Image (spheres, rainbow, N blue to C red):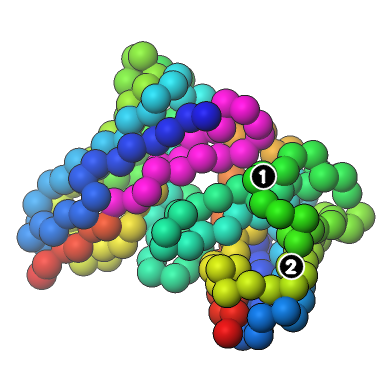
Amino acid sequence: SQELEQSPQSLIVQEGKNLTINCTSSKTLYGLYWYKQKYGEGLIFLMMLQKGGEEKSHEKITAKLDEKKQQSSLHITASQPSHAGIYLCGARDTGRRALTFGSGTRLQVQP
Amino acid sequence: KAGVTQTPRYLIKTRGQQVTLSCSPISGHRSVSWYQQTPGQGLQFLFEYFSETQRNKGNFPGRFSGRQFSNSRSEMNVSTLELGDSALYLCVSSLAGNPSTDTQYFGPGTRLTVL
């Protein structure tokens, strides 16, 4: 089955700094998702990438799917306290119509 | 357009009881999936329903079951609750359930605590 590894596991940055979170797959990615989760709450959809080389942006968050479709990165520019939370990457499980997820990256932004 | 709604948001049960959770997908969406999230195992797929039929199932025991109604609303049931069933249960709504093409929208979750 497909495995997704996220790095780093946790991150503390000063407000205003840029940061990058990576998601690496053991297999080719089809339908790579990025979600944000506040503790104990549901997942907020950020972006979905489908094609190798695809890049999408929303406000100060940019996500890319590399050409070989086995890695994605999430970049936050000029971080703010509102960006704090757990970022999860998810991808279609190659065996079925479901998502498999990375273990998450916990982001803290210090004012 | 209203988002995915789940009820109840919080539940406390004791071992051996059963529980039913409800999910209403986004209007027009016909696929509903369920996931369990725990600190130890992370997010794990339970099952998916499309047009009232279970189309996909994860690796959970038969105590976990679900159904979908003609209006696409879905319920999941857990019988003979165990302590390990304490988790956040998340419902996912999508148009047709293909994660490669259909955006998967999560609900706020139901927090189940088993004592």
| Residue A92 appears left or right of A17 | right
Q: How crowded is mark 2: few (under 14 residues within 10 Å), some or many (20 or more)?
A: some
The chain that hosts pointer 2 is B
Q: How far apart are marks 2 and 1 (CA)?
A: 14 Å
- Asked if the stretch drawn in magenta spans residue B12, the answer is no
SS class, disc 1: loop
Quickly name the residue at label 1.
Answer: B58
Q: Can residue B109 be seen in this snapshot?
A: no
The extreme right residue here reads B70
Tell me which segment is drawn in magenta.
A89-105
To which residue does mark 2 refer?
Answer: B78
Residue type at numbered disc 1: Gly
B28, B34: nearer the viewer = B34
Q: Where is residue A12 in the image (x, y as percent from the top left)?
A: 13, 59
Q: Is residue A95 magenta?
A: yes
Relative to residue B69, is residue B36 drawn left or right? left
Q: What subunit carries mark 1? A: B
Q: Residue at horizontal 74%, vertical 73%?
A: B80
Q: Which of B46 and A72 is in front in this view?
A: B46
Residue at horizontal 11 percent and vertical 57 percent from the top = A13
| Neighbourhood count class around disc 1 (C-alpha, 10 Å): few under 14, some 14–19, many 20 upward | some
Seen in the picture, residue B53 relative to B12 is either above or below; the reply is above
- The image position of residue B56, as x and y in percent, is 74, 40
Residue B59: x, y in percent? 65, 45
* In the foreground, B51 or A79: B51
The quadrant of the image that shows the C terminus of chain B is bottom right
